[in-house]
Image (cartoon, rainbow, N blue to C red):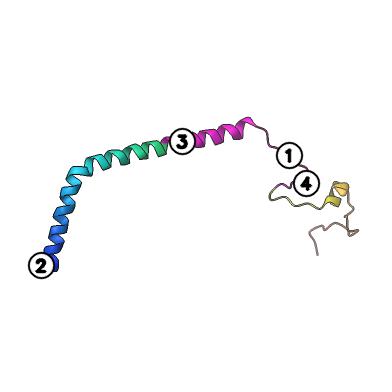
Amino acid sequence: MFGLSELAIILIVVIALVLAKKGPELARNAGKSARILKAEARAMKQAEEKQATDAPPRVVQGETIPGRVEHPSTDAFRGTDQHPDGMPPQTGRP
């Protein structure tokens, strides 16, 4: 009967025969797919860049700017020494 090493050798030979016949075709198809994927990714990136530079930013009422949180009542006291809560401004000293 066959041992494990003989079965491994037969399996390797069968795989080599199949790859010899279908290998070039598989490699060609993989190359075409890679080129198509690369071209589509490049086109999407260019479309995003064009869209970002062409259109001005949309401002929606009630939308906040990320990273900037401001209480609505602080706008009235901007540039004054008065704090919206009635507390004096902090000077940085204890």
Callouts 2 and 3 close, C-beta under 8 Å: no
Q: Is residue 5 above or below residue 18?
A: below
Q: Position of residue 74 (x, y in %)?
A: 84, 51
Which residue is identified by label 4? 62
Q: Secondary structure at mark 1?
A: loop
Q: Earlier in the sequence, mark 2 or mark 1?
A: 2
Callouts 4 and 2 close, C-beta under 8 Å: no
For the residues labelled 3 and 1, the Cα–Cα distance comes to 29 Å
Which residue is identified by label 3? 42
From which residue to which does the magenta span run?
39-65
Which residue is identified by label 2? 2
Name the residue at 37% across, 36% down: 35
Quadrant of the drawing holding the C terminus:
bottom right
Which residue is identified by label 1? 59
Question: As shown in the figure, which amino acid type bears the numbered disc 2?
Answer: Phe
Q: Earlier in the sequence, mark 3 or mark 1?
A: 3
Quadrant of the drawing holding the N terminus:
bottom left
Q: Position of residue 85 (x, y in %)?
A: 88, 58
For the residues labelled 2 and 1, the Cα–Cα distance comes to 75 Å
* Residue 86 or residue 40, whichever sits in front: 40
